[in-house]
Image (cartoon, rainbow, N blue to C red):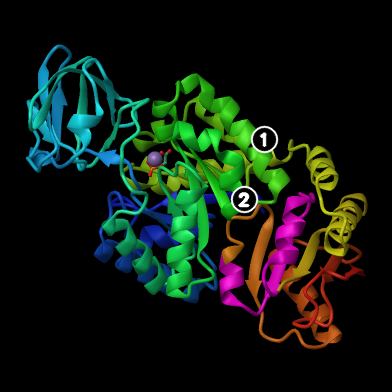
Amino acid sequence: MNKTKVIATIGPSSSSKEVIQELIIQGMDVARINLSHANYDFCTDVMNKIADINEELESNVAVMLDLQGPGVRVGRFVSGRAYLKAGDRIRVYATNVLGDNTKFSVNYPGIIDDVKYHTVIKLDDGAITLTVIDKEVDYLLCEVMNDGVISDYKSFNAPGVVFRLPFLSEQDRRAVQFAHKMKADFLALSFVRSSDDVLEVNDLLIELGNDHLGIIAKIETESAVEEIDDILKVSDGIMIARGDLGVELPMERVPVIQKSIINKCHIAGKVSMVATEFLSSMESGIRPTRAEVSDVANAVMDGTDAVMLSGETTIGAYPIETLMMMEKIIGSSEEDINYLELLDTAMRTEKQDTTGVLAYSVAECANRLKCKAIVALTMSGYTARKMSRFRPGCPIIALSPNMETVKSLALHFGVVPVLVRDLSSFDVIMKEAVRVTRELVMVDSGDKIIITGGYPFQEVKHTNFMKVEEL
Ligand code: PGA
Ligand code: MN
């Protein structure tokens, strides 16, 4: 059973019930829908399908909605795309025009004021570069620097230029309300610039009375990289969004930023996830490159909680094969994670309170006794999150009577969240722990598991016991 979680973005290639079901069977933990591309009808349809399949398969796949954020995107093109040729001139309008190979629009009226002559513009995560050569009242005249195909709603970046946009547009406010209404589990925030941006969303969620939506700040601007420590404090998790990050900053800085942020998240006890282009070549073929395989393996060995697929599963021809390949690489790489080092980092930076010290002892004990599972009883998810931070070598089965808690653990490394009904007496807890373990993990008689949590359940707020159970 793999411990690193997988987020798969759902798009046209993967929105049928059959494909979603197969993605779930093959190990998708979280389904992401990117609101830069998808409309509410699409989201509702996919979310209903996931709810149905979760019920049929007794799975707990969570849903992440990803806000467009104050990023700029190109508009639509005649027949969805246009071929741009190096040396050609192209007009960039701040008003709505249907694009072709001589013009296109962007969804930001301030663009003409914000850029300067010679500003470099990157389209589609940097696939095409334009240079501004003239400014008119209603358009920018640009020179195309390299050949490429641009299609509807692809990204538009001007590295070094800060767009003067409020964090939450009217459209994104509606999207937050939609996520609340639809009971989404995670909300990813694109183009976060500072902790204030995250707090603006938190305020809106408080207004809506929503206390369970997990907030994931996407790090994809230069200022987010600078402000990471403050952003971490106010977010539930961090996504290293390498697509835009590698355009906003020199690409060659992305690997070290990735490693540094994963480490910071681990120390802060927040979930980390790495996104974009892991297995891009599988959008059109069934074999990844060696470099792509290495990239997945390195993210896993760095200790990330989750990895994400985007184009591979939204528009790629092989969404299921790609997910299976990713799981295969994860499984193999997890054998080489330095669990002891991660445990040591967690211990050195942990609060020396009862829960922290107990979680450390449980992880250490599980490693030394080669336990097959740690069963964590958890009301709010706190015990399970703490256990995950200590990165024990065996799975952490999190039993909770609360569905929101179960879903909130979908991104945490090594945690297998399970909904249970009754956890009233110690006797019931022990029996449930053994029953669920036998269902989920291959065990022989004589194998050991550790059961941990706070008892009396629902009364104490911290972890206060561990029991080693021989099967
Ligand atoms: P996106 O975010 O897919 O919404 O652009 C991820 C990234 O930029 O890497
Ligand atoms: Mn992005």
Q: Amino acid at mark 1?
A: Asp
Residue 118 lies, with reference to residue 450, above or below; the image says: above
Q: Mark 2 = which residue?
A: 233
Question: Image check: 65 left or right of 360?
Answer: left
- Magenta residues, start to end: 379-407
* Figure quadrant of the C terminus: bottom right
Q: Position of residue 206 (x, y in %)?
A: 48, 70
Q: Of the numbered discs in the image, which one, if any, rests on residue 302?
A: 1
Q: Amino acid at mark 2?
A: Lys
Q: Position of residue 171 (x, y in %)?
A: 27, 57
- Between 414 and 153, the one nearer to me in the picture: 153
Q: Secondary structure at mark 1?
A: helix
- Tell me where residue 328 sits by quadrant: top right
Residue under the point 7% across and 40% down: 98
**Could you tell me if residue 443 is visible in this image?**
yes
**Ligand 2 appears in which quadrant?**
top left
Q: Of the numbered discs in the image, which one, if any, rests on residue 209?
A: none
Count residues near mark 2 (Cα–Cα under 10 Å), then give few for <14, some for 14-19, many for 20+: some
Residue under the point 66% across and 52% down: 413
Magenta segment includes 388: yes
Q: CA distance from mark 2 to mark 1?
A: 21 Å
* In this rendering, the label closer to the viewer, 2 or 1: 2
Q: Position of residue 444 (x, y in %)?
A: 84, 63
Question: Image check: 396 left or right of 10?
Answer: right
